[in-house]
């Protein structure tokens, strides 16, 4: 099981042109350019704390708003995760993290089950952080979930600062995904009684 777990995915529509390159077994290096500064910061944190190597180049219709760019980045990142994990042989499948960031405390739990589902429980006091609409946090994780075929639960346990809450979500997701994608030598095939993920 020494194959390079990586993927490059490009998706081009009338609204966005996005390329994502992901290395699961990386060191946390990233090169992110979405045109949305706060979103870049979140994705850099995701890469660093999950120890993924991640390159994202995104050109979107930001003259409209940030929606298409953020949602489509989620779609392409999810597709890259799915492709990089291939048949998911030998992985732990489940991952979870309760992550503190100052006032914020966030729970994230995931299952690389092949079945998409998002449960998102959070309340933001601010509508925007920089040029990032806070309602797009849920849309991003929804897109990742459906594109990757992944069950994601994100829950705000406590916190009031919107920046901290969102950043803690991205970092908690990174740590949970790092755990779920790790190989376990005791798992010789797939961690499923059905024989498929």
Image: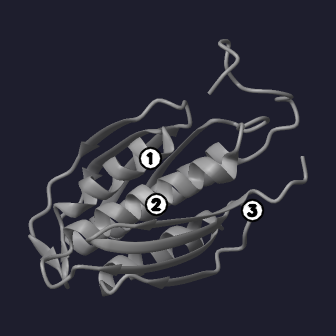
Please tell me which residue is depicted at 54% across the width and 49% down the height of the picture. Answer: 176
Question: Cα distance, mark 1 to mark 2?
Answer: 7 Å
Residue 138, position in %: x, y?
Answer: 25, 53
Is label 2 in a helix, a strand or a loop? helix
Residue 157 is at least partly visible in this image:
yes
Q: Quadrant of residue 26?
A: bottom right
Position above or below: 80 against 20: above
Q: Earlier in the sequence, mark 3 or mark 2?
A: 3
Please tell me which residue is depicted at 75% across the width and 56% down the height of the picture. Answer: 5
Identify residue for label 1: 147
State the count of labels: 3
Identify residue for label 3: 25
Front residue of this view, candidates 149 and 125 = 149
- Give the farthest residue toward the top: 193
Please tell me which residue is depicted at 71% across the width and 25% down the height of the picture. Answer: 191
Question: Cα distance, mark 3 to mark 2?
Answer: 19 Å
Q: Quadrant of residue 139?
A: bottom left
Residue 112, position in %: x, y?
Answer: 56, 37
Residue 7, position in %: x, y?
Answer: 66, 61
Residue 152, position in %: x, y?
Answer: 41, 41
Residue 98 falls left or right of residue 141: right
Position above or below: 53 against 150: below
Image quarter hosting the C terminus: top right
Residue 101 is at least partly visible in this image:
no
Task: Confirm or deny contact between disc 1 and disc 2 (CB under 8 A).
Answer: yes
Front residue of this view, candidates 161 and 131 = 131
Is label 1 in a helix, a strand or a loop? helix
Identify residue for label 2: 76
Please tell me which residue is depicted at 72% across the width and 37% down the height of the picture. Answer: 87
Position above or below: 170 against 184: below
Question: Cα distance, mark 3 to mark 1?
Answer: 20 Å
Q: Earlier in the sequence, mark 3 or mark 1?
A: 3
């Amino acid at each position: 099981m020494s194959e390079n777990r990586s993927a490059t995915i490009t998706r081009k529509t009338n609204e966005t042109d996005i390329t994502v390159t992901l290395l699961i077994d990386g060191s946390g290096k990233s090169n992110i350019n979405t045109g949305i500064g706060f979103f870049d910061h979140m994705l850099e944190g995701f890469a660093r704390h999950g120890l993924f190597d991640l390159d994202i180049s995104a050109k979107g219709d930001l003259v409209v708003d940030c929606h298409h760019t953020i949602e489509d980045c989620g779609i392409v990142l999810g597709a890259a995760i799915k492709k990089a994990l291939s048949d998911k042989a030998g992985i732990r499948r489940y991952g979870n993290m309760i992550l503190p960031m100052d006032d914020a405390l966030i729970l994230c739990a995931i299952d690389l089950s092949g079945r998409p589902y998002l449960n998102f429980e959070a309340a933001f006091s601010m509508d925007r952080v920089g040029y990032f609409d806070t309602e797009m946090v849920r849309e991003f994780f929804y897109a990742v979930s459906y594109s990757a075929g992944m069950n994601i639960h994100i829950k705000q346990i406590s916190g009031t600062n919107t920046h901290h809450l969102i950043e803690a979500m991205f970092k908690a997701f990174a740590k949970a995904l790092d755990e779920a994608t790790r190989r376990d030598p005791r798992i010789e095939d797939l961690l499923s009684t059905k024989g498929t993920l």
